[in-house]
Amino acid sequence: MLMNLFKFKGGVKPPTNKTQSVTLPIATAPIPSRLVVPLHQSIGGTPRPVVQAGDKVLKGQLIGEADGRISAAVHAPTSGTVVEVAMHVQPHPSGLDALCVVIAPDGQDEWIARTAVDYQSLTPEEVRARLQQAGVVGLGGAVFPSHGKLTASKTVPMEELVINGGECEPFMTCDDMLMRERGEEIVRGAGIFRNLLQAKKVLIGIEDNKPEAIAAMRAAVKAAGEDFEVVAVPTRYPAGGAKQLIRVLTGKEVPASKRSTDLGVQCFNVATAYTAWRALAHGEPVVSRIVTVTGNVHAPRNYDALIGTPMDELLDLAKPHPDTDGIIMGGPMMGFLVPNPQAPVIKATNCLIAHDDRLFPPKPPEMPCIRCGACAEVCPHELQPFEMYWFARARNFGKTQEYHIFDCIECGCCSYVCPSRIPLVQYFRFAKSEIWAREREKNAADGAKARFEFKQEREEREKAEKAEKLARAAAVQAARKAAEAAAAAAAVGEAPLPAAPGPETASAAVDAAKDAKKATIEAAMARAKAQREAVQPKNVEALSNARQKEIDEIEARRQAARMADAAGPAPTTPAGGKAE
Amino acid sequence: MMLAPAPYLLKDVSVSQVMTQVCIALVPGIAAYAWLVGPAILVQLVIASLAALGAESLMLWMRGKPLALFLSDGSAIVTAWLIALAFPPLAPWWLVALGTAFAIVVAKHLYGGLGQNPFNPAMVAFAVCIVAFPALMSQWPSVGLQLTTGDQIDVIFGLAPRVDAMSGATPLDALKTALKLGDGDIDVAHLLSNQDLYGNFAGRGWEWIAAGYLLGGLWLWQRKTITWHVPVAFIGALTLISGALWLYNPGQFANPLFHMFSGGAMIGAFFIATDPVSGCTTPRGKLIFGAGAGLLAYVIRVFGGYPDGVAFAILLMNLGAPLIDLLCQPPIFGMKDKS
C-alpha cells in the first residue's frame, strides 16, 4: 500500500472545523414546499426547457435538454407540477437571475421508470451519452459535464485515473460522509470511468484527516474486487484541488495551458463517480446531492438534499443560531456569501455554512503590500501574487498575464496569509474579468475591421475592373486609329513598303494599349491603397497587438509609396502618346 | 448583509506582528550592546523611536492617512532602531533624530510610504549622515573609556564636552588605518593581538553584539519571518572574498571570521538586506542580492574610504533589486520544463 508521494509547493493549514458535521450519518432532507431548479447548472450550454407551466412531472423526468456537446441535462428532483418556467435568483455572487423550472412537489416522490443498464454492453459513446442525459457533472464544485472528460487523448496513453476524495476545504465533509457510507458505489463509478478512459491505474486520494473514509474506501475497493489504490495524502489546503492531487499522487503538473489527458491523467470527484454509477446501474439521473450544513448552527450535519431546495430551508434543518447573518456556499476558502438566502441548492452546492462574526471575524483594514513574499511561499501554482497584485492594481493587465495570472486557481492561500490583509484573489478576479472583457471588445473590433477591409477590397476591385474596361476601350480605339492611319497611308500610295506598315503599327498599338492598361491599373491600385492607408489608422484602436499593426501599416505605406513612384510618371492618356 | 469575498478565514498575521518580531529579534544584540559598550544605546533607541513616530505622524497627517492604523504597524520603529544601532552610540541626539526624520520623511514617505520605498530608509539615513557629518559619524567611544551612564547621556545631549577619548575608530576602521599606515610592514595578526581593541575573533565587545544579531536573526529564520537566502548569500560571499584574500596574503587581510563579526555585517545580513520592500523577493534574486551586498560590503570596507561598507553595499543592491527580481522569476507550476 505504501507508495511514493510527491509534494506540491505552497499550501496552508487553516483550522479544519470538520469534526462538527461528521458526528451524525447523512440524513435525507425533507421535500421542500417548492423546488426552483435552474436550467444552467453546469459549465457549457444552457439546457433547453422541455416542460411548461402546468405540466405534471415525475421524479427524474427530463426538464432541461442538454444543449450542445458540453452541456448536461437537468431533471425534476421530485414528482409534482411545474408552476412556472421563469427567471429566479441564482446562488452566484452576482445575485443575478436565471431561467428556472419551479416545481410544486406532490409529496409522492414518484420516480419515472428507471432502467438499469449493464454499461459494459454499451459502446463508450453510448455510455458518455447516457451520462450526459443523466446530468452527471463534476460535483466537487466545478460542475463540468463529466462525459466531456471521459475521452482519452489519442496520442497519450491514460496512465492514471485519480479519484478525488481530498476535500481540503475547511468545514466541508460531504465527500467524507459519502465515502464512509456509500464507498462501494463510488468504487463502481470509478470502474466505469476507468473502463471509458482505459486507465492503467486508479488512485483514490484522500486527505489523512479522514481515517474513517480511508478505511471505508479500502474496504469498498476490496469488496468490489478492484485493484484501486486508496492513498492517504497529507492534509494541507488545497491538496484536494484537482491539479494538486494529481501532482501529489503522480508527480505530474498540469499547467493551465494543457488538459490533464495530454499528460495521461484524469481526475474526478468521488461524488461524481457515485452519481455516474447511480445513473447507469440504477437509471437515476442527478436530482439530489450531499450538502454539508454547518457553521453557526446547532446541529451541523450532512443532508441528501434535492436540487432546487431553497438554501434557507435546508439551513433551517440544522437550526442556525439567531446571530447568523449570511450563508456561505462552498468552503470558507473559495466559497461565497449568497446574496439571497432563498437561492436554490444546485449541483455545485457542496456545503452551506451559516456565517457569523464569531466564526468569521470581519476583515481588518487593508494595509499596503510590504512585499514580504508570504503569498508567493504559499501559492500552490508557484506564482508571485504580490507582483500580480501590483500590476492588477495599476490596471497593467498585460503585465499580470506575463506573471501568469490565468494559472491562478483562486484557492485563496495568498489572501489567507497576507499580513497586510489584502484581498489578493479579488484583485486577480478583477484583472481576469477585465482581460476577458477587453478581449471580447477586441474581437468585436477585429470583426468590424475585417468587414471594413473586405468592403474596401471589393470597392478597389470594382474600381480596378472599371479602369481595365476603360483601358481596353482606349486600346481598341488606338488600334482603330492606327489602322485608319495605315489605311490612309496606303490609300495615298506614297508608301515605299506596301504591306509591312499595317501589321507593324497594329502590333505597336496593341503593345501600347497593354502598357497603358497596366499603368492605369497600377495607378488605380496605388490610389486605392493610399486611400486605404489614410483611412485605416483611425480604425486601429490601442489594443494589445496595436504595435504589430503599426509596424504592418508602416510597411504597407512604404510599399504603397514605392508603387506610386513607379506608377506616377505614367501619363494619364498613354495610348495616344505611345502610339506615335 | 455583508458580501465580503472569500477567503473568510484569515491567518492571524499582521504587519505589526512582523515588525514586532523584527524588534524582538534585535533584543539580544541590543542587550549585548548596552552591556558591553554602554547603556547610552538605549537612550539613542528612545530618541530615534520618538523622532520616527513624530516624523511618521506628520507625514501621515499630511498625506491624509489614518494615523492609528499606520503608526501601530511598527515599521517606523524598526527603521528607528536600525538607525540607532548603526550610528555611533555617543552621537549627539539631534544627529540621530535628524537621520531618523530624514529616513521617514524622504526615504519612506516621499516615495509613497510603507511598502513603496526603493531604498532601505535606515541605510539612507546612515549614508546621508556619514556624508554630511563625517566627523560626528566617525566618533566611536574609545576602548577603555569608562563613562557613567549619566555622563554618556550628558554627552548625547551636549551637556558635557566631546573629548578626544570619545572619538576612537571602530575596530574595523582601526585595522584598515593601521594597515595603510604600516604600508605593508605591519602584520594583521600583530594588530589583532592588541587585547585592548580586539577580542576573541573580532572587535572587543562588538563581536558579541554581532553574535547577538546572529542569534536574533536565526530566530527570525526559525519563525519564518525571513528566509535563509539573503543571510546565507551575504555571509557566504563575504566569507568567500575575505577568505580568498586572507589565504592569498594573511599578513595584510583579516580572516573571514573577523569580517563576519565586524561592523554591520551581521545586522546587515539578517536585518537590513532581508528587508523585503527594498530587497529582492524571488529565491534566486535573494541569493544574488545577498551575495552582491556581501561582496560590495567587503570591497568598500577594505578598499574604500568609509569605516564600513554594509550601508552602501545594501543601497547599491537596492538599486538593482527590481531588475534582479525581473530576471529571476521562478518557473511556475507545470511550466518547469519549458523555461
Image (cartoon, coloured by chain):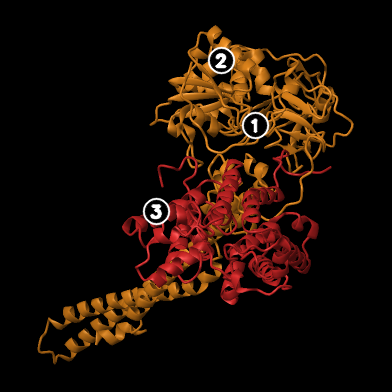
Chain colours: A orange, B red
Residue tagged 2: A187
- Residue B321 placed where, x, y %? 51, 60
Image point 55% across, 70% down: which residue? Answer: A538
**Crowding near the residue tagged with mark 1, few <14, some 14–19, many ≥20 C-alpha atoms within 10 Å:** some
Image point 56% across, 68% down: which residue? Answer: B168
Is A435 positioned to the left or the right of A524 in the image? right
Residue tagged 3: B240
Amino acid type of disc 3? Leu
**Crowding near the residue tagged with mark 2, few <14, some 14–19, many ≥20 C-alpha atoms within 10 Å:** many
Amino acid type of disc 1? Gly
Q: Give yes or no for contact between labels 1 and 2 (Cβ–Cβ under 8 Å).
A: no
Q: Earlier in the sequence, mark 1 or mark 2?
A: 1
Residue tagged 1: A141
Quadrant of residue B138 in the image? bottom right
Give the vertical position of A206 relative to A557 (above or below): above
Kindly state the secondary structure of the residue where label 2 is placed: helix
